[in-house]
């Protein structure tokens, strides 16, 4: 199970929000330095989100993202305001390993089908939910009351094998992940899942590790690392990758 440190960028700083609310806590003013820090601790993949882009609909912190890709020395997956094929191409050309789609994926099935046909596993969809409803636009709105299971079924039918799943009500709370929701998604869809939201302890990671044979392939960890609940080295040891 891959342990993936998260770098959320807002106004050029590394921040964490709680449940998507705009009450950011700044942890660093240098995203590139933060990425290097996680790499030194053993990260093999870094999860970068442009929060400005998620809110506005177009990536704003591309310079920082490209510098992370250039200097980190490990794979980077990136999302936040990516809503066109041209932007996907720009990011891949810059060296991003995998581009994350959220809002446009939920809103435009035709676009998503075309994107998958062209980019295949170079893109991944993030299913961001609250009460089983898909959230869009930086988690600020629910799209047409779209059910996460219906959306997941569409993704599988389109050809996706793996998704990112975030329970927004858990994100940044340090109260543990939505294990039941993850189990349900695994069972109902057969998709592989990268879990995100609520990780607070090594025990949380252990619980997700027990779902590895069911399809949990990775865990995105943010606030718990920044708050020192455990080290990335400890998490990597437990994850086994």
Image (tube, rainbow, N blue to C red):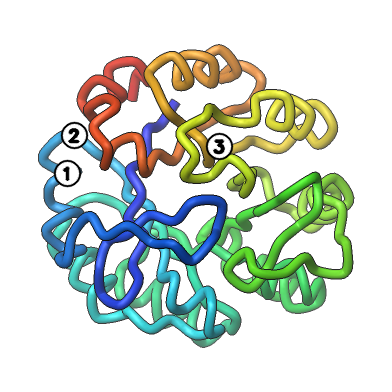
Q: Which x, y percent locates residue 91? A: 39, 75
Q: Nearer the viewer, mark 3 or mark 2?
A: 3
The tag on residue 195 is 3
Residue at horizontal 44%, vertical 25%? 1
Q: Picture quarter containing residue 239?
A: top left
Q: Please report contact status of discs 1 and 2: CB closer than 8 Å, yes or no.
A: yes
Is residue 82 or residue 213 the one in the foreground? 82
Residue 117 visible? The answer is no
Q: Secondary structure at mark 2?
A: loop
Residue 88 visible? The answer is yes
Alpha-carbon neighbours of circle 1 within 10 Å: few (<14), some, or many (≥20)?
A: some
Distance from Cα at disc 1 to Cα at disc 2? 5 Å
Distance from Cα at disc 3 to Cα at disc 1? 20 Å
Residue at horizontal 41%, vertical 70%? 50
Q: Tag count in the figure?
A: 3
Q: Which residue is mark 1?
A: 39
Q: Earlier in the sequence, mark 3 or mark 1?
A: 1
Distance from Cα at disc 3 to Cα at disc 2? 19 Å
Residue found at the very far front of the displayed protein: 23
Horizontally, residue 46 falls left or right of residue 39, namely right
Q: Secondary structure at mark 1?
A: helix
Q: Which residue is mark 2?
A: 42
Q: Is residue 54 above or below residue 188?
A: below
Q: Which x, y percent locates residue 20? A: 55, 58
Is residue 6 or residue 121 the one in the foreground? 6
The tag on residue 183 is none
Alpha-carbon neighbours of circle 2 within 10 Å: few (<14), some, or many (≥20)?
A: some
Quarter of the rendering occupied by the C terminus:
top left
Q: Which x, y percent locates residue 176? A: 53, 27
Q: Secondary structure at mark 3?
A: strand
Q: Is residue 233 above or below residue 55?
A: above
Q: Earlier in the sequence, mark 3 or mark 2?
A: 2
């Amino acid at each position: 199970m891959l342990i993936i440190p998260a770098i959320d960028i807002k106004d050029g700083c590394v921040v964490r929000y709680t449940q998507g609310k705009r009450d950011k806590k700044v942890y660093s003013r240098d995203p590139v330095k933060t990425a290097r820090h996680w790499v030194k601790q053993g990260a093999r993949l870094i999860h970068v989100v442009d929060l400005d882009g998620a809110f506005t609909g177009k990536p704003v912190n591309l310079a920082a993202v490209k510098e992370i890709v250039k200097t980190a020395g490990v794979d980077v997956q990136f999302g936040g305001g990516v809503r066109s094929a041209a932007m996907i191409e720009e990011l891949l050309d810059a060296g991003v390993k995998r581009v994350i789609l959220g809002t446009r994926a939920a809103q435009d099935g035709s676009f998503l089908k075309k994107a998958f046909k062209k980019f295949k596993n170079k893109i991944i969809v993030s299913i961001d939910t609250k009460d089983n409803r898909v959230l869009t636009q930086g988690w600020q709105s629910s799209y047409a009351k779209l059910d996460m299971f219906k959306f997941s079924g569409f993704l599988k039918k389109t050809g996706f094998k793996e998704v990112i799943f975030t329970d927004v009500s858990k994100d940044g709370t340090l109260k543990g992940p939505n294990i039941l929701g993850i189990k349900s998604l695994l069972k109902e869809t057969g998709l592989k899942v990268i879990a995100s939201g609520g990780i607070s302890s090594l025990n949380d990671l252990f619980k997700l590790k027990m779902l590895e044979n069911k399809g949990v392939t990775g865990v995105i960890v943010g606030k718990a690392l920044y708050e020192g609940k455990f080290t990335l080295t400890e998490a990597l040891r437990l994850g086994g990758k």
